[in-house]
Image (cartoon, grey):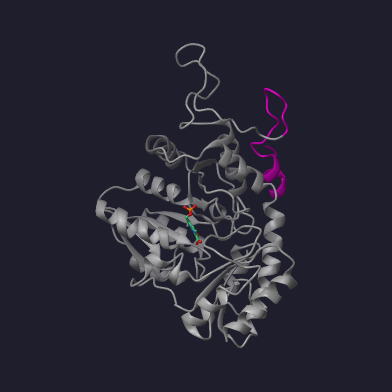
Amino acid sequence: MPDYGFSTRAIHAGQEPDPATGAVIVPIYQTSTFAQEAVGVHKGYDYARSGNPTRTALETALASLEGGAHGLCFASGLAAETTIALALLRAGDHVLCGDDVYGGTYRLFKRVLEDKGISTSFVDTRDPERVAAALRPATRLIWLETPTNPLLKLADIAAISAIGHQHGALTVVDNTFASPACQRPLALGADIVLHSTTKYLGGHSDVVGGAVITSQDEVAARLRFTQNAAGATPGPFDCWLVLRGIKTLAIRMRQHGENALAVARFLQGHPAVTQVFYPGLPEHPQYDLACRQMHGFSGMVSFVAAGGAPAAHRLVSRTRLFTLAESLGGVESLIEVPAAMTHASVAGSPLEVPAGLVRLSVGIEDVDDLLADLEQALEAAD
Ligand code: P1T
């Protein structure tokens, strides 16, 4: 595909009209297997775990959006994470992970992989020097979320990837919160990008999926082998839903960002709120880094309720437009209490999040309606 812009690639990369019928939209190839003319003679597909044309279209499109050579799709974000671990780590290896990550990522490293002899330590990735100091001879992967879930901390992708390369470790960036519309880690030096496509890429809260993108042929070959060998692949309808979602990614992300900034500013001035976290606020301690490595700041905002956990729990059950639910990145606004919901699995660990923290996934509804909803819920929470 020529050097088209981001939105053009979101709509066209990997999505040429169907060669068999001319269908403008990539069909859902709902088949488990493909006919062969003779043993091993076929049209590029033999069995749908190994490959399916709807999945290929999505893998091509996502690789293009992240500026990578290879895209691979999975049944969930965690299936993508598990496949990276199976493909690239063995017993005795060490992973250096950020100290504020999705609770399920922590659970995978601590409760599943540790048992298999793969150790993980958690470090504040806001400071590249701390990352450098925490590297061990056995460190194979540096695992970054930026912005982090749920505290919206940032990591300097270029600086940390360079440190990793000096050490011989690969840097994985979970780009779920930013999406490729707001941040492209491979261009900054990262080795692997990971997504829960469940979130902004799908964009409509109707599908669970994951993706990995890299430009390194050898890494891609190991991932591709493990994708098929371990089998955590997505079905064609799920791939189709994500493909449909990414066509509008750029305009959705613009509106998410605009609404989130207005919500963050509103919360900053509210007496029932003690702290607001949003990388697009000039008051965010890493605003300069945000401006350097992001193009837009996405729709995730967190804040601490003045009355702590009881106030947080009261207010999330009183919003009307913000639906109380886990997940994020859909067109509709969601609200949740990470300590009791998405991050319950980090309770009692050094990654524990404040009990009064409330996380918003700010949708693309009319922003005045969102502000009015928060206003009435915060009043009631006092
Ligand atoms: O849910 P799944 O598609 O398996 O993706 C896991 C995942 C990976 N990385 C990040 C940054 C995530 O936020 C998630 C899933 N997160 C939620 C469900 C949540 O509400 O935070």
Whether 102 is drawn above or below 375: the answer is above
> In front: 192, or 19?
19
Count of numbered circles on the image: 0
Image: 50 above or below 141: above
Which residue occupies the foreground of this view, 324 or 49?
324
In the image, 256 versus 178, the foreground residue is 256
The image shows residue 122 at horizontal and vertical percentages of 36, 66
- At a point 59% along the width and 34% down the height, the residue shown is 54
Q: Nearer the viewer, residue 51 or 377?
A: 377
Q: From this view, report whether residue 138 is shown above or below residue 344.
A: above
Q: Quadrant of residue 131?
A: bottom left
Q: Main secondary structure of the magenta part?
A: loop
- Residue at 60% from the left image edge and 55% from the top image edge: 200
Extent of the magenta region: 1-24
Q: Quadrant of the N terminus?
A: top right
Report the residue that reaches farthest toward the top. Answer: 38
Tell me if residue 56 comes above or below residue 286 in the rendering: above
**Is 14 part of what is drawn in magenta?**
yes
